Image (cartoon, rainbow, N blue to C red):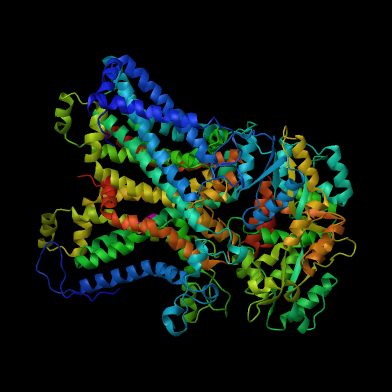
Amino acid sequence: MSSAAPTRSLSRTGQKSHVKPGVIVVYAILIFLTFIWITPTIGLLISSVRPADAVSTSGWWTVLTNPGEAEFTLDNYRIALGIETGGRKYANVNLLSALVNTIAVAVPSTIIPILIAAAAAYGFAWIRFPGRRWLFILIVGLMSVPLQVSLIPVLRDYIKVGLNGTYLGVWLAHTGFGLPLAVYLLYNYVSTIPRDIFESAFIDGATHFTIFTRLILPLSTPALASFAVFQFLWTWNDLLVALVFLSADAGTQVLTQRLLGLMGSFGQDWHLLTAGAFISMILPLTVFFLLQRYFVRGLTAGSVKQ
Amino acid sequence: MRRKHWLVSVLLIASMLLAACGSKGGSQTQTPDAGTGSQTQTPSTSQPQQTGSEKKTVTILGAVVGTEETMFNEVIADFEAANPDIDVVYTGANDFATLIEVKAQGGDPPDIAMFPQPGGAQRMAELGYLVPLWPEILANVDQNYEPMWKELGTFGGTPYGIFHRVNAKGWIWYNKPAFEAAGYEVPKTWDELMALVEKMRGTGIAPFCDGIAAGDATGWKGTDWIESIMLRTTSTENYDRWVAGELKFNSPEVKRAFELLGDIWMTPGNVYGGQDSIALTDVAEAAKGLFTNPAQCWLHFQGSFVTSFFQEDVQANLDENVGVFIMPPIDPAVEPGLAVGGDIFVVFKGHDRPEVKKFMEWLTTVDATKKWAAMGSSLFPHKGQDLNVYKTELERTMAETIINAKAGRFDGSDAMPAELNRAFWVGITNWVSGASDLDTALQEIDAALQ
Amino acid sequence: MRRAPEPHSRSSLLARLDTPLWRGVLIAAALAVSGAFLLETFYFLRDATLPQWLLALLAIAWGVGGVMLLFTLASYLVEQFPATWKRRLIPILFVGPAVAVVVGYLALPTLRTLIASFYDANGQQFVGLANYVYAFSSREMLISFRNNFFFWLTFGTSFSLILGLIVAVMADRTHPVFEKIVKAIIFMPMAISMVGASVIWKFVYEFRPAGAPQIGLLNALVTAMGGDPTPWLLRQPWNNLFLVFIFVWLQTGFAMVVFSAAIKNVPADILEAGRIDGANEVQVFFHITLPTIKGTVLTVGTTIVLGTLKIFDVVQSMTGGNYGTQVIANVQYTQMFRQFNFGRASAVAIVLLLVVLPIMLYNLRDFSKRTEAF
């Protein structure tokens, strides 16, 4: 992973460059930081393919320092995913079902707020109605409210109407907690779309609904995608909302909950935890590297003021 | 979009949906469990539940999940076989404590709740959500259990709960082959135990392994120690006052229990890895030290459920590998009490239908114990059990102790007021990790109730 | 979805039904039927015993499809109204759902939590300020305040910002390929859940007694250098820093990416002018780059500060709040789900709200300024 230090610095300004000692220092510092940043994750990866007793009796780096004695196995993944149960002991580890649950929680929790927020962003940006400024400030002003203040009342309502422990309950909760940011980001984008793009459509008698679905949504794809990545990572990695609203039974638990459960109840099953943690990372990392561009754009949309 | 087009599509959608709705008669029965059904035989074709034979349903919510849930369902199947007109549906929830709390408050409780700790059941009783035990079941309880079990299910003078599967705490486990090879004797008194510990310290292997880490419940293992010691150093009246929060932690009685534990925990060389290790090691991990190669320790203090923490090969042959004795008496004037835990079953107000009563009454009989006892790692307090049902000598020993125990008390910390329980966990953790000295730790625990 | 055009015979009947009133009635009926259908299928899905993957798939389709269906039908319905009504209803159609969700999930619950914070554990008895006395004077909360403000806010925010800046500025001067790799690696933890991160870092901080083989990386290094293994997560109060570092590891990438984008927007000619004036790189950074991206640093800083004040997952999964590592959000969770003291839990939640209030007010002022053009 180390790359040979180049012989010239390539500063974007294209100034005349000769090797300065400073450049070597820059590379050294960056390589050092990168090394610190990636080592723990490499440790996790290596640990997840080592036999159970090896994981808890010797450090993962012994695989690198002493490769002759290293053993590798995929058993941790097999047990974690419930393909093997290793007797009754691991019968309820089954992270595969938790993985399915996490997808079922994260996908709608990402799409539903986008739909609702896009409609609202369009409404605030392009429809004139009394009180819209205050409504906008109300929604966006609640952006930094800690969701802890909502948990107890919402949970009580859920119990009353039978939403507790259901996917719908969690989707709506994530929608509620993610909406202010979504409205804010999408409003920033939608309000900058030049009006003349849909002026002609209005003259042709198109309805707001048509303009919204046929013009605005396609035009806003970058902003929608950036928020989608953000919200997806957030809902996928969320622990608190899941703990509160999905606590009903093992059948609906998501990965973060199961990992926490494994930590608490089987402190000794580290080998499973490593496999489990890695299983929980694969999808968000993939999404993230595929849509990295959008993510960055979304993050910088509201903050980098020109 | 062309004009006429949408109208047709609306009509089409509407008719489709109507057809879909029509095909399934309103089955909006509010089943008590949310989420994916852990019910075993609900027909997924969503037929209304009233089909012909009028099956009556009993719903139970409990904290037992995973393998134990499978076992409990097999026990239930025995009851259903004897009562074909009753369908008992058990739902196990990982976060049972929260769920039962909100369900009860939301007016949607199950028929029966199976509390893993008495504290929750006591709360429900105090809030007036529960039905007191009725005469027929009280007759069963009086006949089939030692009186202490009735007392344990009594809150505010009224009996509410019954026991089925139980566990006992206060056992000291050892590696049988090693223990015997070294020629050690099981200690009969606290002084003998301390002498044995002294002897063991000289072997280069620590006398004890211990670990109290358990996520946000870290510390409970330490409270078990204190409770078992208290039951051997002071009267049950004092113990009860202590659990109720009346006897302070900085009282001489409680402080003495801490000091006795300190003799074990804080004497250098007594515990593998010392105090840091006790604070940081997971409860389940600590038990393994008896059987590692080389062994880390000679003894390990833990409840009857410890066997599932041992290594697989040890579990495969418990009788040959594992030895156990109960914590010996400390104060000669005090008859040692047994610290017990167990699932306590209670019925919610308005749910005491005949079929619910019938199931509860059945749980108090020996018939309800056989199947689970035979499956292993579960103990029952019912009198008149055939002890041969248990798979190992180890379980027989423990079951016998439990059945015959005259004086028993609950895991005290579980029965304490919630704030005190938590402070107890935190306090004992602070004490062992060196963050607070003993007096400070005790004061901080007491401060929780002010 | 496009369907084949219908046969002629039916369109005449349809033409007769094609009046606003009939349309309105039909669409309203369709809306009602869809609503009923969705409710019905909700109960069906909730209680069904289908294979899990199928259930998840159906649930996703139901949730996303349901939202789309209802919105589409509702907008058709609005279109049938006379013009004046239409003008009133259209904003409700577009903005209504968002307002309803935010009011229902954030605004009203906040008020209800505020009320609950003056009542006892079960919300039966009015207890005045007793819960707030607990929230501001109990040992657990005092430790939490110390940890949240001193360790998490101060160290967590500054480390993340400084490291993010260092990487952004330095990587900017390296070979593009190298820069890409470095940024990807530093950014990667962003996609990892805090619980997953805690598993990763357990293998760094794990402690084994002296003499036993160390499986934690940090203690392995210490013992390799001849030191004694240290229980990193036990030594108060510095154990907090080890938890904070996990957070820094997660957040630095976020700061770095945003800073990187901002730095690339600093006009090259200004930088060049500075260099020609004889400023060295450090001076250029402090006198030109940093002032230019100040706004960005502030925004990212705000986001990270909010993160540190609400920190929960790392503490919950690494220590459970033990060994003096308790934080406000974790006390709230514990009071709610371990102690069932809803009064105290509400008060602690309100304290958390008070803590983030300055940031909220600043944001509100900012929004009101920016929306004056509304």
On screen, residue C266 versus residue A296, left or right, reads left
Q: Quadrant of the C terminus of chain B?
A: top right
- The range drawn in magenta is C157-161
| Depth order, front residue of A280/A180 | A280
Residue C321: x and y in percent read 55, 55
User: Is B93 on the left or on the right of B244, as rendered?
Assistant: left
Residue that appears at 63% across and 31% down: C126
Which quadrant, please, contains the N terminus of chain B? Answer: top left
Q: How many marks?
A: 0
- Residue A176 is covered by the magenta coloring: no
Q: Is residue A265 above or below residue A5?
A: above
Up-down: is C283 above or below B317? above
Judge from the rendering whether residue B41 lies leftward or rightward of residue B335; answer left or right: left
Query: Percent from the top left, x then y, of residue C57?
Result: 43, 46
- C49 or B396: nearer the viewer: C49
Q: Measuring from the top left, give residue C227's x and y in whole percent.
A: 50, 79
Residue C202 in view: no
Q: Main secondary structure of the magenta part?
A: helix
Q: Quadrant of residue A207?
A: top left
Whether residue C150 sits left or right of residue C339 in the image: it is: left
Choose between A301 and B55: the one closer to the eye.
B55
Q: Position of residue A142 (x, y in %)?
A: 39, 36
Q: Residue at x 32, y 45 (%)?
A: A227
